Amino acid sequence: MEHLADAPAPVVTCDELVIRYGDLVAVDGLSFRAMSGEVVALLGPNGAGKTSTVETLEGYRKASAGSVAVLGLDPRRDHASLVPRIGVMLQRGGVYPMLGPSQVLHLFANYYDDAEDPDALVDLVGLGGVQRTPWRRLSGGEQQRLSLALALIGKPEVVFLDEPTAGVDPEGRIVVREIIAGCRQRGICVILTTHELAEAERLADRVVIIDHGRKLAEDSPAALAAGTADGSIRFTTDPGIDTGALVLAMGDGIGVDEESPGAYRLRPPPGAAIPTVVATLAGWLAERGLALGDLRTGQSLEEAYLAITGSAGTSDAPPDPGLDGRRSQRAGRRAQR
Amino acid sequence: MRPLLAQLRVEATMIFTNGETLFLTLGIPVLFLLFFSGVHVLPTGTSHPVDFLVPGILALAVMSTAMTALGIGTGFERGYGVLKRLGTTPLGRPRLLGAKILTVIGVELAQAVVLVLVGLTLGWSPGRSGSGGVLVGVAAGVMVLGTIAFGGIGLLLAGALKPLVNLAVVNTLFVILLLLGGMLIPLAKLPGWLADLSKVLPASALADGLHASLGSGTAVSGRDWLVLGVWAIAAPVVAGLTFRWE
């Protein structure tokens, strides 16, 4: 069994986890692992079971079935020995409303035997200018960054970040991303939840896609995007081109759809030579004096996500507003071209 | 020890710099004492209303700190997710509770000093209506039991109700017990059935115990000890069993 002893042990183990609230099954047999220095994103729409999963790992909830372990410990039974080694960022709140960032970080620093320097941490998360402003008067993004700093104050080995970029402005997002990258460098294991694909794509080494409490896919963002790629070629040009003529010009049984005004998809048969298809397309457009806007032969994590959650046949949940907004935004951008 | 002291410092800072809490714990008792010892509208049944008012308002002060200030503050901390967040720090519940208890004791000591000084200035003569002496140790014991009983009631409500509902309920309870608890108005002035009801409440047992030990310098009745003792056990036990941290 020596090879097992040599293999690095996972820092977080979630094994066939089931969480029920009465009749509602929030998490339904979820399994995943995370190693030190790894950033794992739990990605899914609201109500997918992400927060329930993370809160079970933090020891707030009891598993109805299955098991979880963090740093080899049981989050509930070994609570006292585990809490000094983990950092937690709740989805909302968690801070005394009357206290400012500096005061609350100094307070939390005193809870730990070995803590980060609170003043340095205030600067790291960019709250130096508001360090005496009471929490309730901070902006949403500032509150999130303070919560993130509180998750790091005790020099944790694992941090759990529930929606770390929700409500954070673009500048704050860069700060959050840099801090998460810093955690990875120092060998901290980061488990985060998000319903935003772009964030998962930017932040995570590995993405676990969850819907209705079940894991739909798990891989690196790039591999997930490649894995569901169907060989389609997407491009934009003027709306309402004669797709019938284009089909004839392309030949080879290549289909053409206008997905939204001005946004088109070519569906070459398997094994088609993509560069040749692109050359034919470009020639056809040039003959008619049409512009060629976006041209993409792969696909984004977003398309992979939609393909995965769509094909799983479980997307009868109310659509996530974030995803929906992004979908129509994309359509809008295409329409503008 | 360091986590406890840090927590204690923050809890004390929050309570002593919060205007509403200061008004509740010091402002109202001092104003009541000044007003009602100067304006003789209460049926205190004595030619020196201040003799009746100081012990009664000390009871009021204990109730305002242990039940109202502690209960409302804890309710909002629960609502803001502070208690939940503290659950995943090494602070731990015993130290959190310890810091809150020490803060309550500190506020009560400050209240007692201020009220006794104001009372003496207004001509309070401890024990004038009885032996001429006072039972300070007995009074302290009564206040400790009252603190535990009211602290338990405050935490019981804070751990069960939404913050704003808790705020409303605790404030309403405060006013009802203030009127029915023999703190400003002697129980003898209440209708019989109301007085009988009041006698099993911790407010009147606390006020009666302080009137006896500080007002007349006489022993506290067995019934008062019993009522206070039962509340001091029952309220914290029920609070501990029903408290929801998030």
Image (cartoon, rainbow, N blue to C red):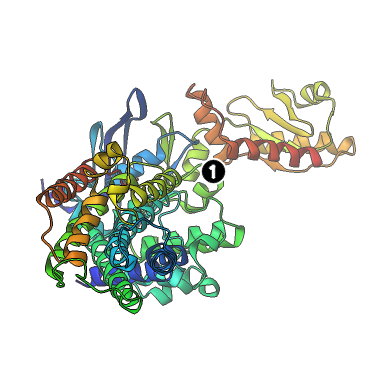
Q: Position of residue A125 (x, y in %)?
A: 48, 68
SS class of the residue under badge 1?
Answer: helix
Apparent side of residue A124 relative to residue A252 in the rendered image (left or right): left
**Residue A238: quarter of image:** top right
Q: Position of residue B95 (x, y in %)?
A: 22, 62
Q: Nearer the viewer, residue A18 or A147?
A: A147
Q: Count of labels shown?
A: 1
Q: Position of residue A157 (x, y in %)?
A: 29, 60
> Which amino acid type is shown beneath numbered disc 1?
Leu
Apparent side of residue B221 relative to residue A187 in the rendered image (left or right): left
Q: Position of residue B36 (x, y in %)?
A: 41, 64
Q: The N terminus of chain B lies in which quarter of the figure?
A: bottom left
Q: Look at 31% across and 54% down and name the residue there.
A: B67
Q: The C terminus of chain B lies in which quarter of the figure?
A: top left
**Residue A69: quarter of image:** top left
What residue is disc 1 on?
A197
Most extreme residue toward the front, as rendered?
B47
Decide: is B12 above or below B150: below
Q: Look at 14% across and 72% down and name the residue there.
A: B133
Q: Nearer the viewer, residue A15 or B113?
A: B113
Mark 1 surroundings within 10 Å by alpha-carbon count, few (fewer than 14), some (14 through 19), many (20 or more): many
Apparent side of residue B155 relative to residue B135 in the rendered image (left or right): right
Q: Is residue B93 visible?
A: no
